[in-house]
Amino acid sequence: MSIKVPGTAGQFQILENHASIVSSLDAGQVEIATAKGEHSFYNQESGTIETANEAGKKLVFDITGGFVEALKNDISLLVRGIKTI
């Protein structure tokens, strides 16, 4: 698993077993990739959190800002202005 985010002090990457961190995010691009391709996402139409499994899939989207938290291999994003690429 890895995630690249546009931190306010510059882009950084969070890998598996990363130390706990909370950071603010600037406008930019977020890239999410998992080894097995499994990822959870919020389905705006149904209002539920869903899980998809697509091996080799990389999720890329633009944001206008927000926050990221990494804690015990769980990563949470709170972002605004999402545009899927």
Image (spheres, rainbow, N blue to C red):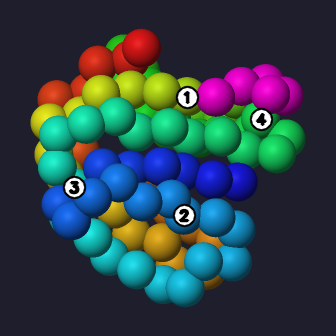
Q: Secondary structure at mark 3?
A: strand
Q: Earlier in the sequence, mark 3 or mark 4?
A: 3
Report the amino acid beneath label 1: Leu
Q: CA distance from mark 4 to mark 1?
A: 10 Å
Looking at the rendering, the stretch of residues picked out in magenta corresponds to 53-58
Q: Residues within 10 Å of mark 1 (few under 14, many from 20)?
A: some
Q: CA distance from mark 3 to mark 2?
A: 13 Å
Q: CA distance from mark 3 to mark 4?
A: 24 Å
Q: Earlier in the sequence, mark 4 or mark 2?
A: 2
Residue 68 in the image: x percent, y percent? 34, 62
Q: Earlier in the sequence, mark 3 or mark 1?
A: 3
- The residue that disc 3 covers is 25
- The residue that disc 4 covers is 37
For the residues carrying marks 1 and 2, which lies nearer the camera in this image? 2
Residue 75 in the image: x percent, y percent? 50, 62
| Residue drawn at the location 48% of the way across and 72% of the way down | 70
Whether residue 49 sits left or right of residue 72 in the image: it is left
Q: Is residue 42 above or below residue 11?
A: above
Residue 48 in the image: x percent, y percent? 45, 34
Marks 2 and 1: in contact by CB < 8 Å?
A: no
Which quadrant of the structure image shows residue 25? Answer: bottom left
| Residue drawn at the location 55% of the way across and 28% of the way down | 59
